[in-house]
Image (cartoon, rainbow, N blue to C red):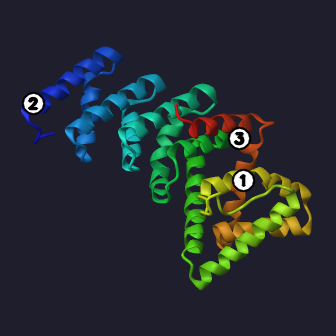
C-alpha cells in the first residue's frame, strides 16, 4: 500500500472504520487483511471487495480473520470471480450450519489442498464437501486434506496422461474402461469414465461413483472382486501408491454411505456444493 494514492488510502481507511463498526472486527485486523491482499497483488478495488468478504466470513463462520483472509485469497487465486468467491464462501457457511463439518479446521486445511485443486480444476466447495464427510469418520481435517490432495494429484495426473492419446495412454485408458465395465457388471451399478457429452470425467466425479460401490466390491469378496479393486487402484494411483489409494477409498466409501452420519453429512454438503446459493 506504500504506492497507493491519498484517495485510495482514504477509501481503505473508510472501509476499516465501516467494517469495524458493522462487524466488530478490530481496525488492526482489517488493516492487516488489506495489507496482505495488496501484498499479493490485488488492486485497490479488489482489496476492498476481498476484505469485505473476509470480514463477513470471519464473523459469520467464527474463524480467525487471518484464516478468513487466507481462504478468500486462495479462492481468488483459483481464478474465481468476485461473485464465485461469494458463492463459495456462502456454501462453506451453509455446510458449517447443516453438517458437522468443522469450518475452522476446514478453512485452515484448504491452504494445503488448493494448489492441486487449482491445477486440476476441482471445485473448492466440492473439496470441502468431501472433507465434511471424511472427517466425520474421526479423521482430522488436516489429514483429510492430505489424503484428498494425494488422491487428486495421482488420479487426475493418471486421467490426464490417458487422455493424451499416445500408445501408452490409449492402453491405460482401455484397461481402465475394461475394469469399470467389469465393476459395473459385478455390482449392477453402471460406472463410466465419460460424461453424457463424451468428455472424460474429473477425478472428483469418478471418486463419487467408485466410492459408492467400493464397499459393495469388498462385500462380494470373490477373487474377481478383490482383483478388480487392486486393478482399479493401480490404474488410478499407480502400483506403488495402491495402499494409500485403498485407504482413501475406504474412508470415502464410509462417508458416502447415507445410512451413516458420515454419509448424511457428505450428501448434504455435496448438495450444497453443487447448487447455486
Label 3 SS: helix
Label 2 SS: helix
Find residue 163 and report its horizontal and vertical position in percent: 57, 72
- In the image, is 27 to the left or to the right of 124? left
Disc 3 designates what residue? 137
**Residue found 57% across the figure and 58% down from its top:** 152
Label 1 SS: helix
Mark 3 and mark 1 in contact? Answer it, CB < 8 Å: no
- Return the disc, 3 or 1, that comes first in the chain's sequence: 3
Find residue 87 and report its horizontal and vertical position in percent: 46, 35
Above-or-below relation of 147 to 100: below
Above-or-below relation of 78 to 274: below
Disc 2 designates what residue? 7
Crowd around label 1: few <14 · some 14–19 · many ≥20 (10 Å): some
Crowd around label 3: few <14 · some 14–19 · many ≥20 (10 Å): some
- The numbered disc on residue 191 is none
**Residue found 66% across the figure and 34% down from its top:** 268
Disc 1 designates what residue? 209
Crowd around label 2: few <14 · some 14–19 · many ≥20 (10 Å): few
Give the Cα distance between marks 3 and 1: 19 Å
Above-or-below relation of 106 to 149: above
Give the Cα distance between marks 1 and 2: 54 Å
Amino acid at each position: 500500500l506504500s504506492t497507493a494514492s491519498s484517495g485510495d488510502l482514504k477509501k481503505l481507511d473508510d472501509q476499516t472504520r465501516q467494517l469495524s463498526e458493522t462487524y466488530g472486527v478490530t481496525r488492526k485486523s482489517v488493516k492487516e487483511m488489506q495489507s496482505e491482499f495488496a501484498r499479493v497483488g490485488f488492486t485497490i478495488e479488489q482489496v476492498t471487495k476481498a476484505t469485505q468478504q473476509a470480514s463477513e466470513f470471519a464473523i459469520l463462520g467464527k474463524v480467525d480473520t487471518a484464516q478468513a483472509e487466507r481462504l478468500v485469497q486462495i479462492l481468488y487465486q483459483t481464478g474465481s470471480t468476485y461473485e464465485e468467491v461469494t458463492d463459495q464462501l456462502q456454501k462453506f457457511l451453509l455446510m458449517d450450519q447443516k453438517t458437522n463439518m468443522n469450518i475452522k479446521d476446514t478453512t485452515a486445511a484448504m491452504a494445503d489442498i488448493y494448489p492441486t485443486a487449482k491445477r486440476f480444476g476441482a471445485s473448492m466447495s466440492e473439496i470441502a464437501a468431501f472433507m465434511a464427510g471424511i472427517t466425520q469418520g474421526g479423521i482430522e481435517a488436516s489429514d483429510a486434506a492430505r489424503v484428498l490432495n494425494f488422491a487428486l494429484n495421482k488420479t487426475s495426473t493418471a486421467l490426464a496422461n490417458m487422455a493424451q492419446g499416445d500408445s501408452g495412454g490409449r492402453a491405460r485408458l482401455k484397461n481402465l474402461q475394461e475394469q469399470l465395465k467389469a465393476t459395473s457388471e459385478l455390482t449392477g451399478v453402471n460406472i463410466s469414465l465419460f460424461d453424457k457429452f463424451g468428455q472424460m470425467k474429473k477425478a472428483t466425479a469418478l471418486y463419487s461413483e467408485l466410492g459408492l460401490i467400493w464397499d459393495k466390491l469388498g462385500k462380494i469378496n470373490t477373487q474377481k472382486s478383490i482383483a478388480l479393486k487392486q486393478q482399479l487402484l493401480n490404474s488410478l494411483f499407480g502400483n506403488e501408491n495402491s495402499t494409500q489409494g485403498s485407504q482413501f477409498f475406504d474412508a470415502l466409501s464410509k462417508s458416502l454411505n447415507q445410512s451413516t452420519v458420515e454419509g448424511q453429512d457428505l450428501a448434504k454438503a455435496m448438495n450444497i456444493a453443487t447448487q447455486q446459493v
